Amino acid sequence: MHETELNDLSDDADYAASLQQGSASMTRSDSSRRSSSSEPDGAEVVYLKDNVTIHPTQYASERISGRLKLIKQGASLFMTWIPYKGQSSNARLSERDKNLYTIRAVPFTEIRSIRRHTPTLGWQYIIVVLSSGLAFPPLYFYNGGVREFLATIKQHIFLVRSADDANVFVVNDFQDPLQRTLSSLELPRAVPVANGLSSSLSASESPTDKNQVRADGVAVDGSLSSIQNNGRQRQKMHDPARDLSIHVLEKFSLVTRFARETTSQLFRENHSEGFGANERRNHSQSSHDYRQNAASIDVEKVPHEVPVAPDPLEKSPRSNRGEAAATNVGTFELIDSKEIDKLTVWGKPRQPPLGPEEWATFLDSEGRVTDEKALRKRIFYGGVEHNLRKEVWTFLLGYHAHDSTYAEKEYLVSIKKSEYETIKNQWQSISQDQARRFTKFRERRGLIEKDVVRTDRSLSFYEGDDNPNVNLMRDILLTYSFYNFDLGYCQGMSDLLSPILFIMKDESESFWCFVSLMERLGPNFNRDQNGMHSQLFALSKLVELLDVPLHNYFKQNDCLNYFFCFRWILIQFKREFEYERTLRLWEVLWTHHLSEHLHLYVCVAILKRYRRKIMGEQMDFDTLLKFINELSGQIDLDAILKDAEALCICAGEHGAASIPPGTPPSLPLDTGLLYTQQDDEVL
Amino acid sequence: MSYAYLFKYIIIGDTGVGKSCLLLQFTDKRFQPVHDLTIGVEFGARMITIDNKPIKLQIWDTAGQESFRSITRSYYRGAAGALLVYDITRRETFNHLASWLEDARQHANANMTIMLIGNKSDLAHRRAVSTEEGEQFAKEHGLIFMEASAKTAQNVEEAFISTAATIYKKIQDGVFDVSNESYGIKVGYGGIPGPSGGRDGSASQGGGCCS
């Protein structure tokens, strides 16, 4: 219905009126409101609207009303939404709930887009999407004023309507020439419209041109529409994926509540650790440096890098502009930096590993784990202290049930020990004479003997001639190949067993923990590789969901088989990290907190971290495989786990739906014939 | 480092025949009896000189176990040379050669040069496959043949280099269209006379004045 006025805001009456008033009186709020505001020095409220409400649930009684403001400080524009205090009708909502939703001074540098919804029935509302990819809940304007809100924003920052959806307004904040230049260098893909402008202007630009450029954004002299039309064409040409990604991201706004909840919880938990603005800025800076280094260290690089399509979930607009934004925050920073951090929804800092005292709090007097879910979550975020692993791993791997007592565990251990001995005896009793007529056994044993002496021998636990632990590994693997004769032995199994034996020390315990692990990962070693193929397929679906440009790149370059991630998945990143780091990763994966398939999100997280390099250098399958192989030892586990967690939350049910049922490490769907019988030809 | 050509090699053969050790001996000139078994693929590279031309060998060392055949097949693409390795002390590794060869013929470029290597020649006292059998197999299938030892380095250089020499000769004879990278050959800068004077990568910065 708004077809004609949707093309531009310049025909907006409020907008035009506010322009005529000039910047000095830009605010439409009256002077008493302004003077009564508690904003710091130099901050000016340029927009204020009461009765802007969020609907956390479908119950009318649980709506939270508040005041929406736009605040200008220096060259920066901030948005705040503070819920009203002490509304008796909201008795069911705690102050904590309200705090959860409070938007405290989020700078527009961190906002990617705003979508407005103007239903014919009901209230108008907007959805604000952050550059991190997450969104605030819809803000309902009970007293109207969406158009005015957008018009006010447009007076202060660069805001353009999306070419593909007239109700989406893409934000970019280029107050100063430096940022604009940075943006044209670093973010040719962030907002192509702005890029089109800045690349044509920045070359000749001096700081004195600043106002003129800003004026372009709000000009009423007729040049605006031509610039914008031009911009729209560019946007269409350069980056069709962008608006698509906006739509995708809005779907993710459903998970925002969860994300914010965990984030603010985290904020409370880690308050003392001071993960503050400075650290964040340093992080931004270092990741920025990294990008440049990564681009310059490669010896055989393609001389001219190709422009890379944006990461739909990328946070780089903030990391590139974060420093300037933080500087611009000025006095705000002192007051609100912690609050701004509260809005950092992208991954949680890792926690220290679970120690013995805390572990004891999860157990009742008889040794049962009282809150399995809480324990798994705790381990997800920090792992387990080394000395505790022997005990905790048996539980994580499912060898001991969480609700079994000390006595039950002890009993199970003794039963299982004799069961192990029985199976082991099956091959031990094969005489030399018998073995001569038992080719399959000889081959299997030969293969295992060859491989155990090629597994982690640089580790002191396994090094040296006639190391008893190497012999233990051989015995366990050979026993397993009798326990699961159909699957037998396949290379990679020794990599999975090695850390388990290293932790458990005990032969029978290691065997049964390995058995538990193989119930989930066994299909990785099927002769037909079906377990691997289903995971690689799921991975391709997840990349398609979470990074369309990267997916398209792999598709164009015939890389969709994802064979370059084969080793990662087959042995759970065992060769990609140092030994101790692998132990940490595994126990985190085994918690199955958030997803049984976190390892696939870890893959996505690593690929996303290097997406710019991969696409920029136009890596083909061979180059990519080599590149991925050589990442071994280079990956920062904690950072990747944070990213993987965020991606998993972001993908939500769409992610889960991308992974076919029964994909390892999910337990197999049918309990019938688990493994197609292996033809034991040793090749 | 600049090169006239880059050749992609792939090393194939049963598990435990010494593929990784041959590679390490060739690239690092050392024998490491204790190393991790290969999962998927590992890479090595070395510069050699043939006909006074610097040639870079990029070598793909693959996992040998049967289960990984389907993924190994994807590595053949664009290989100019293959080293097919068996262990002279284990008869079965020789018996499986035909199956490896079939894979190579099916998934690699038809003009790929294949070198058959009977490894572990230092263990002649435990020999299970005679030199003549190796020669015979190579002759029947049109392969180059050598017995070698990754441990003593005997014939290791020769195996890699004579494979490269064969590929080089094929280029000279016009068997390959070197502009087509699916043959596993990339033309480099160094050694080939060209307008840029053979500089690697810095051509785009040349000519202008510095600021």
Image: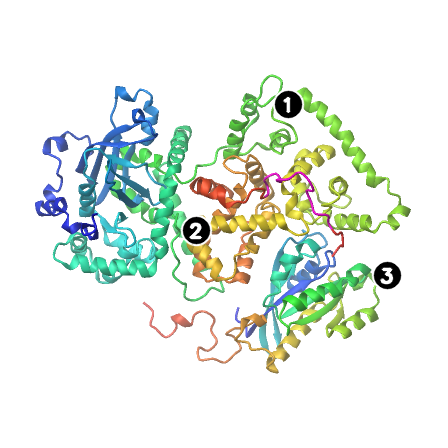
User: Quick check: A673 above or below A270?
Assistant: below
Q: Is residue B178 above or below residue A611?
A: below
Q: Secondary structure at mark 2?
A: loop
Instruction: Judge by depth and name the residue closer to the eye, B107 or A348.
Output: B107
* Circles 1 and 2 in contact, beta carbons < 8 Å: no
The residue beneath circle 1 is A404
Is disc 1 placed on a helix, strand or loop? loop
The magenta span reads: A664-678
The circle on residue A547 is 2
Query: Which subunit holds the residue at mark 2?
Result: A
Residue A200's spot in the image, x, y percent?
Answer: 24, 62
- For the question of whether residue A643 can be seen, the reply is no
Residue A24 visible in the displayed image: yes
Please tell me in which quadrant of the rendered image residue A460 appears: top right
Type of amino acid at the residue the image marks with label 1: Ser
Residue A554: percent from left, percent from top: 48, 58
**Residue that mark 3 sits on:** B125
